[in-house]
Image (tube, grey):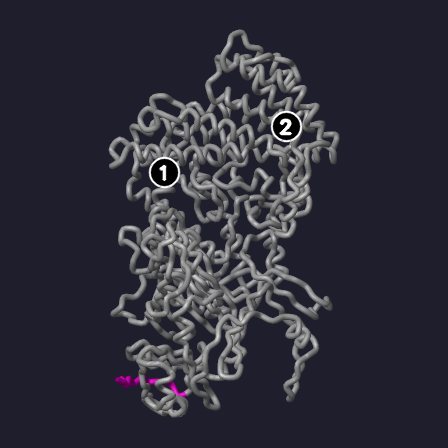
């Protein structure tokens, strides 16, 4: 049974139109005339074979579509979706993005909703249109200015680029009919399948089932929609899957495909500067303008933001603001905080010369705009993901040729409020009266949400993390009410510094959250202001006079050196690592001891106490780890322009002493008997001992010892090698003269771990398997210290000396743990201690 539907179609087919059994709007406008590939998707009710057999004549239909002056008649034939594709789209660059629109009930979007994205070109081959990916490696372009000619000629450099690379064909679309100006394509099979290069299988593994293959009889195109510059198709795929017992199960998922025509005129590139942290796209230019045969450059990812009136006084309005839509599923009580998170960025854009550049709006209702979709690649959308996962993320879709960000879909999982709420309690319960009990009040959670979303908005603007900004402010600044009211707790909201735990009760500090900071204003101006290359260079150079403008992430393999930089840190704030950590562990200790009172009115006090307690353990170890980085550490960039400095010997010694003493002593609240009896009567003390072992181990990792050794070899005047390092640790353990029998369990565990490592480290022969790090882009020097052993560092002789010192200091006077530990030390020294 055929069904005829009539749509209005512009004569030029200048818009990329997709129909899904509903009347399309008149898109015959100047804007639509330059939009994405002019296509029409018809919803059918049969198959292409039925059409070919005479139910309808596709050639006649195509001719009518291309020559119609008014209404267009379409024969919808069940089960088949057809596209009219103008030939002008062939060889144009398109962007194809796929993401999960709806997950199975048991699956969780641990890595986000994005499946994959490809820049593609369409090519004609026999009776099909091939979709070829152009996303393999960097974008390759010719740098020469094309010569004007009436003849279509390729320059040698263009031929060389074409001959040197070929992308994979990732899809084939059968041609049903053809006219001079267009093709009629059958796209049903491709979108009703799990396309290999956009396979959703890995996203389904969190369901606990293993997807095997798509069942075509239970898979179909669920939604099809067209917009002025992109095509959207949602596919319902049902997989035959297996559970852990090997039994067959059904697993359904909805995959959203968005295909957009990239701008015919790419946005002007802004080349990456390693003093400003932007995400990048890589471009290789052959026959570059400066005469180089080839050069590889990184271009910063940015939105296209242009002044409506370039001559108007700045700041002035843009041609189009950056609009972030709040998806309909966001609960009403959280919407004000999310709107504020977006528009908190307005002052940064004003500093860059734009007024009203970034705004938040509610998504239009179905009545206001029936064609609006949160999966439409034209829109920046903030989504609320109702899954049991604590995270938020802000990925973007961009044009790899220019770095232009085309859109972004920010994802917020509600459990991020629980995670950050508990984190906030652990650090701030002594400073913020609203954080004295759990769960936190709604208003406090709203402020936390505002902070988290604002951070993700920064990512969608192109900004990378700036972990160096966490340590921009000194202790006095962080305890100053006026300073923090203006600057917040870090120099950038793109840091992981979080909240101001350094301030103390009585300081009067009320701004406890990070703000969009000095660095953020600086970075947005660099990325979005209309500046000349010389002005951009001058702006980036300001870091040498203003250290708070410095950027460092330490996340890419090539940035491996920054992982040994104590000024590039996550989950920490404050320039003075030891003093800030001292404040942090004191804050955690007070919160932990108060947990039974803080959770007593919660629905599940014991469960909440256990969860917050375990999260506090991780935070505590993160704090002590930030001090351990000082040992063998480097300063990867400094305000005076020096590219590299070692952490001062005095600071490295102070770090070792702190870790072996105060950091171990600070574990006492975790082993408090009154606390553990409320929720963990067994295993709590053992868990605290394990924390002590972790702290000691962080100082004595083989690569740490290697770095201390290398620093002393390269600069002998430091007089701080492996022997001095171990002596400093031993001094801290024996400084108070307390016998092992009288020590708290955590301190005994720390000394026992120290003795074990002193015996083990001299036998360390390195790990040759770590050589693979070099293939990932890790600097060669860092690869070498992971591959090499410790035999030439003097660790054996130094360890023997320290074992003797420990034996002398802790000689036991009675049997028990102390005697056993003493015998372990004597065994390490080769003394016959007899039977235990």
2 or 1: tag closer to the N-terminus = 1
- Total label count? 2
Residue 818 vertical position relative to residue 710 in the rendered view, above or below: above
Instruction: Bin the neighbour count of mark 1 within 10 Å (Cα to Cα): few under 14, some 14-19, many 20 and up.
Output: many
Measuring from the top left, give residue 152's x and y in whole percent: 63, 86
The CA span between labels 2 and 1 is 36 Å
Depth check, front residue: 98 or 546: 98
Depth check, front residue: 372 or 640: 372
Image point (48%, 29%), residue name: 691
Please identify the quarter of the rendering in which residue 646 is found.
top right
Image point (46%, 40%), residue name: 489
Q: Residue 650's mark?
A: 2
Residue 121 seen in this snapshot: yes
Residue 243 magenta: no
Please identify the quarter of the rendering in which residue 42 is found.
bottom left
Determine whether the residue tagged by mark 1 lies in a helix, strand or loop: helix
Measuring from the top left, give residue 159's x and y in whole percent: 67, 77
Instruction: Bin the neighbour count of mark 2 within 10 Å (Cα to Cα): few under 14, some 14-19, many 20 and up.
Output: few
Question: Which quadrant of the rendered structure holds the C terminus?
Answer: top right
Question: Which quadrant of the rendered structure holds the N terminus?
Answer: bottom left
Tell me the magenta residue range.
Answer: 1-11
Determine whether the residue tagged by mark 2 lies in a helix, strand or loop: helix
Measuring from the top left, give residue 542's x and y in whole percent: 60, 50
| Circle 2/circle 1 CB separation < 8 Å | no
Residue 8 magenta: yes
Measuring from the top left, give residue 130's x and y in whole percent: 51, 77
Depth check, front residue: 83 or 641: 83
Residue 598 vertical position relative to residue 637 in the rendered view, above or below: above
Q: Residue 261's mark?
A: none
Q: Residue 422's mark?
A: 1
Residue 642 seen in this snapshot: no
């Amino acid at each position: 049974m055929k069904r005829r539907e009539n749509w209005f179609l512009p004569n030029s087919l200048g818009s990329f139109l997709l129909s899904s059994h509903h009347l399309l709007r008149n898109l015959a406008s100047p804007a639509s005339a330059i939009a994405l590939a002019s296509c029409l998707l018809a919803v059918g009710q049969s198959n292409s074979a039925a059409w070919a057999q005479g139910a309808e004549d596709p050639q006649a239909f195509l001719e009518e579509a291309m020559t119609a002056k008014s209404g267009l008649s379409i024969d919808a034939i069940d089960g088949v979706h057809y596209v009219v594709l103008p030939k002008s789209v062939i060889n144009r660059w398109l962007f194809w993005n796929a993401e999960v629109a709806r997950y199975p009930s048991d699956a969780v979007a641990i890595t986000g909703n994005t499946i994959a994205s490809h820049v593609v070109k369409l090519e004609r081959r026999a009776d099909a249109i091939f979709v070829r990916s152009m996303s393999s490696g960097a974008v390759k372009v010719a740098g020469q200015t094309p010569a004007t000619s009436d003849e279509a000629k390729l320059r040698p450099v263009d031929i060389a680029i074409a001959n040197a690379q070929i992308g994979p064909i990732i899809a084939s679309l059968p041609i049903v009919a053809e006219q001079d100006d267009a093709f009629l394509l059958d796209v049903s099979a491709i979108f009703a399948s799990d396309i290999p290069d956009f396979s959703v299988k890995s996203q389904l593994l969190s369901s606990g089932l293993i997807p095997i293959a798509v069942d075509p009889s239970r898979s179909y195109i669920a939604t099809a929609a067209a917009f002025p510059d992109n095509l959207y198709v949602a596919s319902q795929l049902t997989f035959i899957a297996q559970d852990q017992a090997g039994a067959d199960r059904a697993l359904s998922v909805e995959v959203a495909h968005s295909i957009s025509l990239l701008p015919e005129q790419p946005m002007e590139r802004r080349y990456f500067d390693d003093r400003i942290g932007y995400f990048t796209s890589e471009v290789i230019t052959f026959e570059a303008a400066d005469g180089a045969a080839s050069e590889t450059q990184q271009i910063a990812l940015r939105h296209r933001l242009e002044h409506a009136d370039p001559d108007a006084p700045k700041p002035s309005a843009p041609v189009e603001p950056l609009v972030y839509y709040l998806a309909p599923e966001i609960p009403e009580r959280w919407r004000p905080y999310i709107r504020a998170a977006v528009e908190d960025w307005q002052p940064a854009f004003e500093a860059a010369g734009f007024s009203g550049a970034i705004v938040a709006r509610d998504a239009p209702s179905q009545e206001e705009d029936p064609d609006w979709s949160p999966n439409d690649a034209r829109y920046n959308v903030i989504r609320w993901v109702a899954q049991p996962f604590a995270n938020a993320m802000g990925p973007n879709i961009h044009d790899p040729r220019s770095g232009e960000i085309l859109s972004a879909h920010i994802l917020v999982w509600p459990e991020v409020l629980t995670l950050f709420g508990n984190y906030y309690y652990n650090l701030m319960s002594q400073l913020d009266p609203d954080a004295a009990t759990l769960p936190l009040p709604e208003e406090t959670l709203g402020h936390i949400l505002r902070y988290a979303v604002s951070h993700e908005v920064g990512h969608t603007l192109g900004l990378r993390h700036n972990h160096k900004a966490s340590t921009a402010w000194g202790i006095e600044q962080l305890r100053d009410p006026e300073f923090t009211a203006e600057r917040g707790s870090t120099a950038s909201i793109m840091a992981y510094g979080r909240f101001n735990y350094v301030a103390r009760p009585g300081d009067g500090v009320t701004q406890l959250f990070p703000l969009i900071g000095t660095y953020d204003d600086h970075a947005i101006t660099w990325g979005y202001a209309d500046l000349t290359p010389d002005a951009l260079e001058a702006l980036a150079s300001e870091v040498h006079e203003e250290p708070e403008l410095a950027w460092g992430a330490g996340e890419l393999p090539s940035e491996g050196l920054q992982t040994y930089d104590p000024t590039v840190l996550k989950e920490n704030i404050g320039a003075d690592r030891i003093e800030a950590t001292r404040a942090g562990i004191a804050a955690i200790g007070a919160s932990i001891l108060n947990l039974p009172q803080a959770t007593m009115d919660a629905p599940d006090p014991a469960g909440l106490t256990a969860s917050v307690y375990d999260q506090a353990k991780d935070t505590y170890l993160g704090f002590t780890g930030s001090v351990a980085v000082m040992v063998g550490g480097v300063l990867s960039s400094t305000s005076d322009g020096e590219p590299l400095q070692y952490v001062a010997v005095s600071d490295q010694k102070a770090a070792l002493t702190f870790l072996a003493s105060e950091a171990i002593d600070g574990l006492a609240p975790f082993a408090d008997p009154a606390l553990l009896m409320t929720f963990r009567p067994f295993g709590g003390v053992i868990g605290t001992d394990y924390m002590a072992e972790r702290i000691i181990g962080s100082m004595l990792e083989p690569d740490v010892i290697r770095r201390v050794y290398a620093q002393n070899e390269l600069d002998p005047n430091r007089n701080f090698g492996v022997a001095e390092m171990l002596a400093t640790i031993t001094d801290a353990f024996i400084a108070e003269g307390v016998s092992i029998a009288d020590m708290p369990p955590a301190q005994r565990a720390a000394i026992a771990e120290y003795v074990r490592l002193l015996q083990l480290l001299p036998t360390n022969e390195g790990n040759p398997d770590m050589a693979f790090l070099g293939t990932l882009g890790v600097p060669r020097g860092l690869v070498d210290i992971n591959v090499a052993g410790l035999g030439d560092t003097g660790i054996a002789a130094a360890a023997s000396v320290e074992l003797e010192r420990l034996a002398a200091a802790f000689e036991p006077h009675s049997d028990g743990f102390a005697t056993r530990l003493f015998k372990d030390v004597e065994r390490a020294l080769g003394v016959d201690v007899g039977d235990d």
